[in-house]
Image: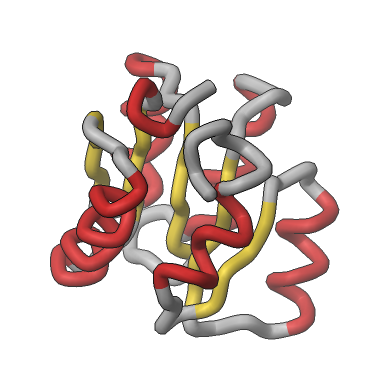
Amino acid sequence: MNISDAKILLVDDSALARRMTKKILDAFGAKTYLEASDGIEAVRLYKEEHPDLVLLDIVMPEKDGLAAGDEISAFDPDANIIYVSSAGTQSNLEHVLGNGSRGFIQKPFTSDDLKLLLKYEFDDVE
């Protein structure tokens, strides 16, 4: 699949973080985004829209990214989730890697950091 054809769900309680992530993804050719500011909204959007990729912040109000990711993975075991957080504790890493996620990236991240994870998922990210 090409990233230009992908539907990407950005989940972060910070509008600035979502905007910055979109800017990086735009440079890779991404065009279609869904946005959520908490885990409850993320799960709802995932179930309704079935995005090809989820970039999921861990620390959020209402429902954190770990709980939202678990719920999304239970709904769709093939969900393509990359967790994003500035709180990269060992327990968080063990949790996300144990639930079949596609990866973890620590904030703040660069375009090159994200490219390392995306180039294995999308044919047109080089």
Residue 110 spot, x, y in % from top left: 42, 76
Residue at 57% across, 69% down? 105
Report whether 111 appears left or right of 89.
left
Residue 123 spot, x, y in % from top left: 57, 32
Report whether 6 appears left or right of 53.
left
Report whether 113 appears left or right of 4.
right
Residue 107 spot, x, y in % from top left: 45, 80
Residue 27 spot, x, y in % from top left: 27, 53
Quick check: can you spot residue 71? no
Please tell me whether residue 13 is drawn above or below residue 56 in the rendered image: below
Quarter holding residue 103: bottom right
Residue at 17% across, 61% down? 19
Please tell me whether residue 59 is drawn above or below residue 49 in the rendered image: below
Most foreground residue, 27 or 43:
27
Residue at 53% across, 21% down? 1
Report whether 65 appears left or right of 75.
left
Quarter holding residue 97: bottom right
Residue at 64% across, 42% down? 70
Most foreground residue, 100 or 30:
30
Quick check: can you spot residue 90? yes
Q: How is the image coloured?
A: secondary structure
Please tell me whether residue 126 is drawn above or below residue 16 in the rendered image: above
Total label count? 0
